[in-house]
Image (spheres, rainbow, N blue to C red):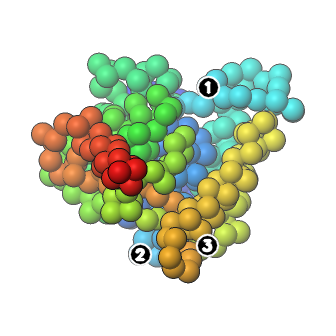
Amino acid sequence: MHFHKSTADVFIPDNVAPAEALARTTHLSIAAHQDDIEIMAYHGVAACFGLKDKWFTGVVVTNGAGSPRSGIYGEYTDAEMQKVRVTEQRKAAYVGEYACQIQLGFASAEVKDRNNPAVAEDLAAILRAARPEVVYLHNLADKHDTHVGVALRAIAALRAVRAETKPKKVYGCEVWRDLDWLQDDDKQLLPASARSNIAASLVGVFDSQVTGGKRYDLATAGRRLAHATYYASHGTDQETALNFAMDLTPLVEDPSLPIAEYVLGFVDRFRADVAKRLA
């Protein structure tokens, strides 16, 4: 498989051939940055961990440039930091026993350029090879422009290959905006209770981010715990950790469905619920 960027990195923890690694994939996450997968798609990692009939593959679209840094990483150049982040993502793939970890190496500006077909083309090639049953994307109400850009390019790719792949479910997941505001009927529940030691390790392995000034390890665990506790006001907790997602499957199944209209439907239902309670 050939990608647009010569710097694209393909890592397979158990050293099988790339075609075989992708073909066995059942759960696939397409994310913007190194560590986004481990924050937003742990549900998929846990669903596959240790099994032989289910496999998780991660795709990171951007090169990791421009990330905040301090401490021992404070003097690192952008090029040096990119190498660190590629290595950390490989470590996470090893810890999580991923089928395959692909890092495409695009710049954020390229991802956000709607007229640049390269990102969607690379993603379409991966989707054709993997044919996943479940796909995890950034949610389309995320406040990070690059996250939304990656999600839009991924939806374009999914639409382009929908006849060949037909995933059963496409989730829009949480990173830079929680989804606790969704109506309960709109929430897709992604349990994240299993193997809390692995969950912690996956986020913790990104030392350049955690000790570099962003405690994603604590924040991710805290959000999952808060969701599990506050999800149901009149019942005991069924999970100790929970992520929420929006269902993006209809956008793939029906390419004529306007993306903005679909996403704003979630917002409209939230607004109506608030208005009803105030009345």
| Residue 68 position by quadrant | top right
Task: Name the spot of residue 220 as percent of width and height, x first.
Answer: 64, 53
Task: Name the spot of residue 225 as percent of width and height, x first.
Answer: 63, 64
User: What whole-number distance in Å separates the C-alpha atoms at marks 3 and 1?
Assistant: 34 Å
**The N terminus, quarter of image:** top left
Q: Amino acid at mark 3?
A: Thr
Residue under pointer 1: 65
Specify which label sits upstream in the sequence, 2 or 1. 2
Residue under pointer 3: 240
Q: Amino acid at mark 1?
A: Ala
| Residue 84 position by quadrant | top right
Residue 22 vertical placement versus 120 (above, below): below
Q: In this orientation, does residue 165 appear? A: no
User: What whole-number distance in Å separates the C-alpha atoms at marks 2 and 1?
Assistant: 35 Å
Mark 3 crowdedness (10 Å alpha carbons): few <14, some 14-19, many ≥20: some
Closest to the camera, between mark 2 and mark 1, is 1
Residue under pointer 2: 53
Task: Name the spot of residue 232 as percent of width and height, x first.
Answer: 49, 70
